[in-house]
Amino acid sequence: MNTTVLLTFGLVVLLLGYKFYGGLLEKKIAKPDDSKPTPAHKKFDGVDYVPANKWVLLGHHFASIAGAGPIIGPVLAASLFGWAPALLWIIFGGIFMGAVHDYLTLVASVKEKGVSIVKIAEKNISPLAKNMFSIFLFVALSLVVGVFAVVTAKTFMKQPELVLPSFGLILVAILIGTLIYRFGFNIWFAAFIGFISLLLLLWLGYQIPITIGGHYQPSHEYWFVLNIPSFGLNPFILWTLLLLGYAFIASVTPVWILLQPRDFLATFQLIFGLLLGVLGGLFAFETLKAPAFAGFHLSTTPLWPFMFVIIACGAISGFHSLVASGTTSKQLDKESDAKLVGYGGMLLESLLALVALLSVSAGLYWLSKPQGAEGFVFQNLLKQSPILAFGYGYGEIVSKGLPFITFAMASFFGMMMLNAFVMTTLDSASRINRLIFTDLTGIKNKYIASLAGLLLGALFALTNAWTVIWPVFGSANQLIAALTLIVLTAYLIGIKAPTKYTLFPAIFMSLTTVAILIFQTLKFGIEGKFILSLVALILLTLALVIMKESYKVFAKYYNLPMMELKKEHKLAAILILTLLGMFSFGLASVAG
């Protein structure tokens, strides 16, 4: 099998999914009515509620949801299980689960005056469900902010060529936002100015790397290296604080000044990198070197439930619901724009995940390379970093499919694309966390609300506390997806709409996350990693509490028995969960 066939297959199926399944959801559930003003118009405040052109909003949404996840997840999944299971989950999981999750969250939030998913949970399930969900999301988003600040800081230290384009884009975005919203420039003319500026920034960044404190070994000949003195402080800490400071400013600045134009311009960069990957794969005709199927397990990692958590953003991710209901719903100009932004934005991310999967599966050798062959070995690069493996695989595919682009240039574009995703997710997560904190506490001062999440994020980042609990973040993210689908099902019950489109994905994702959390609680406990075990147990408890609350709604609608959990029922539930955990752990142990 080669990249040309698989990319063609993926593109065709994703387009058909958008047209037919997305169209079905639009007709059966969304039922857009453009005569009704959206929250962006009804609650316009010039800060969070600001209507945006649908292409600008698609740019914001796609740039915000597509962090490092759709790249790292498929790379790891390919190393564990082979490319075929990952490819099928990315394409069909994206169409029938991820895009449904994103689109209907956006629709529900817009219909409910732009409120967050936690407010929808409160209205359609219970205040307890809302409070539990809010606390969990606030901590999870603070962790995301801290980790992404760390990742970006380390990236700037290793590749200072990315600094100038990354921060220069912020200034260009402010200029473009001002031209469009203050001087009435045509959006596409302003976008053209921004795109030319972006290309210039990329070129200048490649020639003028920026470092803090020096200690950088040049990878090629530059015009000069701009070194900012560190005054004896750790450069990593300075970069991290600088990024957190930027996140604070971005989270309280009106969206038309920075968020909308920045994400719109970043999307040009992202689409350009994605387009290079797609064209490179289509014209490379490169045979996949990785096995199609490497087995149902590797050591203690069974395919189910792990693959469905590892891939995450490429097929379905809970973080997307926070973007859809946190920022995107407050900028939707017309109800009919929701399908392009919500459903289409997710399928673009599935395409990105497909490109990442095929880049490492076809661009790199598996285990070892043939005698005298040029190229890189997947496993050797993976030991250093999955991001590095992607960068090299992407560079190989693009340079082979498009010979006028060198490997070095292609790898740089790939890394720049990834860094742009991380930066946009950093500022979006900060703004969403501000809104979650306000929902949870009632504190409406945007500076206090934003600072609360960033202080917790800084604590995670600067104390390395994130390294302690990050191993369970993937499970936490997919738990958000499962709970969001449950909330959406309850919402559909409330508006008397068909529930099957969210109910079956909710059941699958709930079983998957409960299984992996039981597995992790037991596994980390056996290994003596008691903090991780405790965190997994807390997440499991949270999931079960919200599921119990939602059962009351489902029982009434589906004519299920309304039973109170008596002592014997609780014991039976504990026994069933324990057996499920033992089965998962035993399966992995036997497989290993």
Image (spheres, helix red, strand yellow):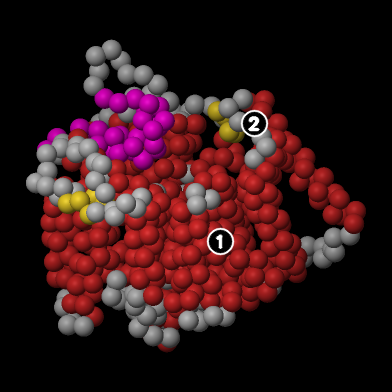
User: In which quadrant is the N terminus drawn?
Assistant: top left
The disc at residue 556 is none
Q: Residues within 10 Å of mark 1 (few under 14, many from 20)?
A: some
Counting from the top left corner in percent of width and height, residue 314 is at 43, 48
Where, quadrant-wise, is the C terminus in this rendering? top right
Q: Which residue is mark 1?
A: 139
Counting residues from the start of the chain, the first of labels 1 and 2 encountered is: 1
Q: Secondary structure at mark 2?
A: helix
Left or right of residue 532, residue 428 in this image: left
Up the image or down, 185 lies above or below 343; here it is below
What amino acid is at disc 1?
Val
Does any portion of residue 535 appear in the rendered image? yes
Instruction: Residue 286: name its quadrant.
Output: top left
What's the residue type where badge 2 is placed? Ala
Which residue is found at the position 57% from the left and 58% from the top? 480
**What's the distance in space between the residues labelled 1 and 2, CA to CA?**
30 Å
User: Closest to the observer: 452 or 440?
Assistant: 452
301 or 101: nearer the viewer? 301
Which residues lie in the magenta part?
375-404
Q: Report x, y in % for residue 441.
A: 59, 77
For mark 2, what is the residue? 588
560 is higher (above) or lower (below) than 182: above
Please identify the dominant SS of the magenta region.
helix
At 67% from the left and 31% from the top, the residue drawn is 587
Query: Residue at the location (43% across, 81% down)?
Result: 39
Tell me if residue 166 comes above or below residue 306 in the rendering. Answer: below
Residue 223 image point, x, y percent? 9, 46
